[in-house]
Amino acid sequence: GESVGLHLPTLSVQEGDNSIINCAYSNSASDYFIWYKQESGKGPQFIIDIRSNMDKRQGQRVTVLLNKTVKHLSLQIAATQPGDSAVYFCAEIKDSNYQLIWGAGTKLIIKP
Amino acid sequence: KAGVTQTPRYLIKTRGQQVTLSCSPISGHRSVSWYQQTPGQGLQFLFEYFSETQRNKGNFPGRFSGRQFSNSRSEMNVSTLELGDSALYLCASSSGTGTGYTFGSGTRLTVV
């Protein structure tokens, strides 16, 4: 069936470096792609989203890139900080479906 | 403004019992979605309610049910609990359109 998956389960990054978290998706009909951050003991927290007709969107310290040709989504975090340690999920949604389809998650570890 | 409130935070039940989980959405939000999170299956969609009507349902057995009240608060019920139902159950509220889902901290259900 349709799914969203992640390439790497764990990513270790030096504090201050940039982080890149990747995601592959299979449903070309989705309207939005979204990144969430989940810290231990908490629910997922919205980071940034991108509409399917865009290829790049920037937020505060984060950038999402969408490559529809290869069905690939990435989240770039600039100047990674200890507070960025969490599990990051990509998700997709179709406007008429009201259902988030989730990737497996990538655990981001920040090395001091 | 207050976030999404899920009660209880933790729950231990015995196989065969039933359980009811509660979710109070952000004030003004009319959509409530429920997700199950497990280490093995990740995040999976259960159902979504909007103005007391179920708009979409995931691929879970009939033991999983939900409802939404006129004040937008939602409950989900799991009957005849199985060990595999042990999971973090997350609720998300939104206005009903777009990607603005806000998640609660979840209810951790353990079935023994």
Image (cartoon, grey):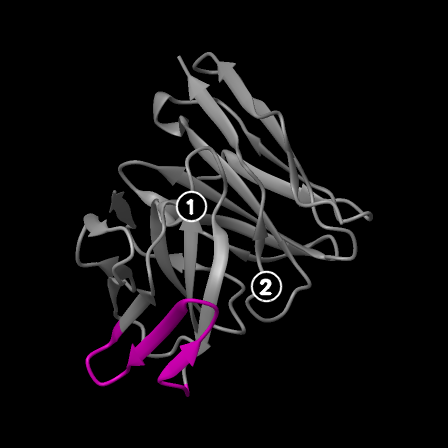
Q: Amino acid at mark 2?
A: Gly
Q: Position of residue B59 (x, y in %)?
A: 41, 49
- Image quadrant in which the C terminus of chain A is located: top left
CB under 8 Å between callouts 1 and 2? Answer: no
**Residue at the image point whose x is 42% and y is 41% from the top:** A39
User: How far across and how far down the image is residue A103, in percent?
Assistant: 31, 56
The label on residue B100 is: 2
* Residue A38 image label: 1
Residue B96: which quarter of the image?
A: bottom right
Secondary structure under the numbered disc 2 in the rendered image: loop
- Horizontal side of residue B69 vs B64, given as left or right: right
Q: Is residue B63 left or right of residue A56?
A: right
Crowding at mark 1 (Cα within 10 Å: few <14, some 14-19, many 20+): some
> Can you give x and y, in whole percent of width and height, for residue A65 in the image?
32, 77
Does the image show residue B15?
Answer: yes
The stretch of residues the image draws in magenta is A53-72
Position of the N terminus of chain A, as image quadrant, is bottom left
